[in-house]
Image (tube, grey):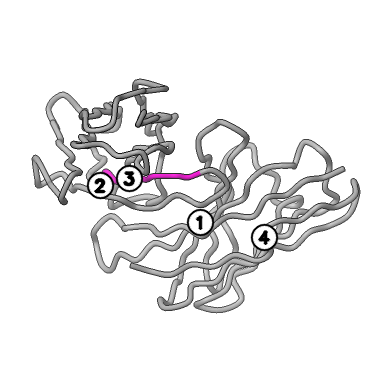
């Protein structure tokens, strides 16, 4: 499977500041990466699909101007939470799909980033 | 869109017993069903998956069964050990569309020593 890293693992910031989270695919070239958000004791909810060389696709209800996604290369996607507020505090996790061709993808997840907005 | 329901939400078993977690899905086009184990503060770890052309898959103490007609799939863990304690998520996806995973609500498994 793919090895996925995230940085930072934890971040605490003040309300109104911006935070950048990096997701790296260490051993697999990913044209697509997914960003999920997980609130305490809840399931993972897809936020957006990060596409290398094109704009990200956001799920309904996710503000694209607040959650900026840049897929800079085949191994790096970044999520920037702009003007963060306490309600943005959550566990952000990226995943790398490793399928090729017309089959549903096996996805490998990063270790997650815990964001706390004061 | 796809909707995945998972039961039970919590499950407590004695060490050595078996554990079964069940999921149902709504989209008949879904054809890939992975199971993830998530420990506290960590990302989900893929433990087993099954595609719709297969009815059952086994990997040591873990097995997954799929009933396409009924649109449900189950995770079976035999000879449970304390280190199996975690939250388990089922998920579903398909070959078309955005191909992201839709997750179930999770099952907190506690294995009592």
Please tell me whether residue A26 is drawn above or below residue B86 in the rendered image: below
Q: Secondary structure at mark 2?
A: strand
Left or right: A115, with B55 as reference point: right
Residue A9 vs residue B68: left or right?
A: right
The secondary structure that dominates the magenta segment is strand
Distance CA(mark 1)–CA(mark 2): 17 Å
The boundaries of the magenta stretch are B32-39
Q: Check the residue under mark 4 and report the chain it is in.
A: A
Spatial CA span between label 3 and label 2? 5 Å
Q: Nearer the viewer, residue A64 or B57?
A: B57
Residue B85 spot, x, y in % from top left: 39, 37
The quadrant of the rendering that contains the C terminus of chain A is top right
| Nearer-the-camera pick, A72 or A90 | A90
* Residue A18 vertical placement versus B82 (above, below): below
Is B69 displayed left or right of A84 in the figure? left
Tag 2 and tag 4 share a subunit: no
Which residue is labeled 2 in the image?
B32
Q: Quadrant location of residue A90?
A: top right
Subunit bearing disc 1? A
User: Marks 2 and 3: in contact by CB < 8 Å?
Assistant: yes
Give the class, few, some or many, for how many residues have Cα within 10 Å of label 4's Cα (few <14, many ≥20).
Answer: many
Determine whether the residue tagged by mark 1 lies in a helix, strand or loop: strand
* Pointer 3 or 2: first along the chain: 2
Q: Which residue is mark 3?
A: B93
Q: Is residue A107 above or below residue B24?
A: below
Check residue B36 for magenta coloring: yes
């Amino acid at each position: 499977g793919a090895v996925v890293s995230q940085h930072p693992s934890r971040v605490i910031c003040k309300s109104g500041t911006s935070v950048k989270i990096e997701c790296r695919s260490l051993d697999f070239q990913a044209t697509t990466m997914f960003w999920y958000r997980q609130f305490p004791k809840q399931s993972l909810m897809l936020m957006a699909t990060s596409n290398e060389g094109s704009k990200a696709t956001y799920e309904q209800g996710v503000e694209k101007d607040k959650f900026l996604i840049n897929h800079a290369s085949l191994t790096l996607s970044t999520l920037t939470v702009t003007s963060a507020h306490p309600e943005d505090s959550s566990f952000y996790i990226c995943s790398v799909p490793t399928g090729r061709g017309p089959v549903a993808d096996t996805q490998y997840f990063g270790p997650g980033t815990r964001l706390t907005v004061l | 869109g796809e909707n995945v329901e998972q039961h039970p939400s919590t499950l407590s078993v004695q060490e050595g017993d078996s554990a079964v977690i069940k999921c149902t899905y709504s989209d008949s086009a879904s054809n890939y069903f992975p199971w993830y184990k998530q420990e506290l503060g960590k990302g989900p770890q893929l433990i087993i998956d099954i595609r719709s052309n297969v009815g059952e898959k086994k990997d040591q103490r873990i097995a997954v069964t799929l009933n396409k007609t009924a649109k449900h799939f189950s995770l079976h863990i035999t000879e449970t050990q304390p280190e199996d304690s975690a939250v388990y998520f089922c998920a579903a996806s398909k070959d078309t569309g955005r191909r992201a995973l839709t997750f179930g609500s999770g099952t907190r498994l506690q294995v009592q020593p």
